[in-house]
Amino acid sequence: MNPTYGAIAVAMVAVATVAVGAFGLRISRTTSDFYVASRSVGPVLNASAIGGEYLSAASYLGAAGLILAFGADMLWYPVGWTAGYLVLLVLVAAPLRRSGAYTIPDFAEIRLESTQARQSATLLVVLIGWLYLLPQFQGAGLTLRTVTGAPLWVGEVGVALVVLVNVLSGGMRSITFVQAFQYWLKLTALLVPVAFLLLAWRGDGAPTPGGEWTLPLDGAADHELYRTYSLILATFLGTMGLPHVLVRFYTNPDGRAARRTTLLVLCLLAMFYVLPAVYGVLGRVYAPDLIGEGRTDAVVLELPARILGGIGGDLLGALLAAGAFAAFMSTSSGLAVSVAGVLSQDVLSQHAWGRRLSGVAGFRVATILAVTVPLVLALAAQRLPVANSVALAFAVAASTLCPLLVLGIWWPRLTDAGAIAGMGAGGIASGLAVMVTIVSSDRSGWLGALLSQPAAWTVPLGFVVMIAVSLATPHRMAPGVLRTMVRLHTPEQLDLNRGNWHPERSQG
Amino acid sequence: MSHQTAKRVRITSPRTTTGRPRRVVVTEEIDAQTALGEVYLRSLMRSQLRLAVGVLSLLTVTLGALPLLFATAPQTRRWELLGVPMPWLALGLLAYPAVIGAGWWYVRQAERTEARFAELAGE
């Protein structure tokens, strides 16, 4: 691949991101602007922004890479990332918007009326956010190396810097414009080359990969059925617990709009997620050597040069690199905003820190923390395939915040003690599994399967502990739970008493 | 003189103050957290939850059953349609419109449930 085109494309995306963000800077003023863009975002813009934020390095590069390496079983990644939004739609979209929460800790406080429950949720949001940021930075390093030959740390530090500048200068409002722009950039960048690649592929006589690779459950790994179902649980249920997903729902005017926006998001995701499989299959035909080299995550970037070659291949490769960078920056920005929002609201504004940091200043300090910690981890940590390590973040979210949201919304008897115990059990179990998986290199056997795909046992664990402890502590039911249920479930046009909780008045 | 039609006279019972049932205002009942108000709220929650569980069950027995199908009847993995292996067709393409369709249906039903509730409570 020609490094000049790639470098220019990547630089252009970085500049455009900052420029579009600066456009938003003029509008954002208050703290509320910084967090949620003042709820004045239209549905298409909002849905594009959700899509842009959600489609990460794992979706853009990782899914195709895993399909190239392991075949049909890996199709569950894109399917799960889409179906996760369907689960979110039917279980939490409208009630979450109606709760009025900016963040999951806000929700915990509204519903459970407990500071400790809020703090437990805060801890998890920060951990999941960091766990999800790590592969984004690593993916950026990999992309820049593939495109320009630069060392890995250049891309990692570069993306972190752009995200930092972007979030610090504009907060959520600018992020909304940036994210929406980046959804369409990512879709275009993946879609246009596909047309050319498929034409060239037909010209070659449409060769298809054969053999066991095309079959699901082909025996390439052990305990495949368990791994598949565990992955399904993690992606289907983990989506709702991702820190950067919820905050977007506040930008809908009401619960009904939240549902409709989610449906629109489903359409946008479906358009995008049919594409990684195409790259995976073409990669199997034209770039099988990447498997041996352990560089399957680069397949999307390498295909144009290999199939088309020449200046056309270089230009399309540059377009793909631009899209990949958009993917890292949009997801990382969204995560950074969410983690920073939670950190500044719940950690930095505590009086215990001597000088109380709040408002915009607190948010800025929190942003720096939110970005540098995972950056240091990315520079130090061992490399898993990008999609695998993102799936681990989903598993933790599915085992902790998913039960909190689902039971909190639908089961009035959930108590703060139950929620804390359940998040603790699910979080410790899935967190340990993740740590062992990142540190160790052996992922075979039953133990390897249980640890590298933990969701199938940690999600039920989280739910069961949450329910059992709640049933054992009925006296701890939140006194205002019925009022909260009115707030979560009744349509806004009805004139009802919904309590008076508001996120900006609350300091955890 | 044209022929006269009988004019209808509505016979109403005399107005009395005794024995008239108090008109139920659902929103007031809910606000006051009476037992009746709670019944209304819970029935709304139950119909929405039933709808959600319905969609999720559908998702489970269709998409969710595929790995089990592939494991218990391995020959299904080799089925082809127009030269495309069935697993790739199902997971790579058909799953997406199916998920959108389920979402669309859910949104319509959930809005209907809410409209019915609002009608009931808005009286």
Image (cartoon, coloured by chain):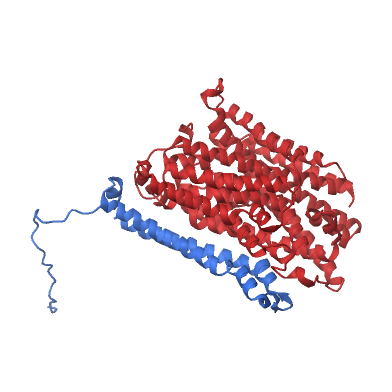
Chain colours: A red, B blue
Q: Residue at x 71, y 56 (%)?
A: A187
Q: Decide which of A322, A363 is in the foreground and name it.
A: A363
Left or right of B64 on screen, residue B20:
left
Left or right of A26 on screen, residue A141:
right
Q: Residue at x 47, y 65 (%)?
A: B54
Residue A33 % position (x, y) = 56, 36
Q: Residue at x 69, y 68 (%)?
A: A217
Q: Decide which of A1, A28 is in the foreground and name it.
A: A1
Q: Decide which of A245, A151 is in the foreground and name it.
A: A151
Looking at the image, the residue that sits furthest to the right is A310
Quadrant position of residue A297 = bottom right
Can residue A135 be seen at all in this image of the molecule? no
Left or right of A96 on screen, residue B121:
left
Left or right of A485 on screen, residue A131:
right
Can residue A152 be seen at all in this image of the molecule? yes
Quadrant position of residue A85 = bottom right
Residue B107 % position (x, y) = 49, 60
| Count of all numbered marks drawn on residues in the image | 0
Quadrant position of residue B83 = bottom right
- Up the image or down, A25 lies above or below B91; here it is above
- Up the image or down, A211 lies above or below A182; here it is below
Q: Residue at x 9, y 53 (%)?
A: B17
Residue A423 % position (x, y) = 52, 45
Q: Decide which of A37, B37 is in the foreground and name it.
A: B37
Residue A132 % position (x, y) = 66, 45
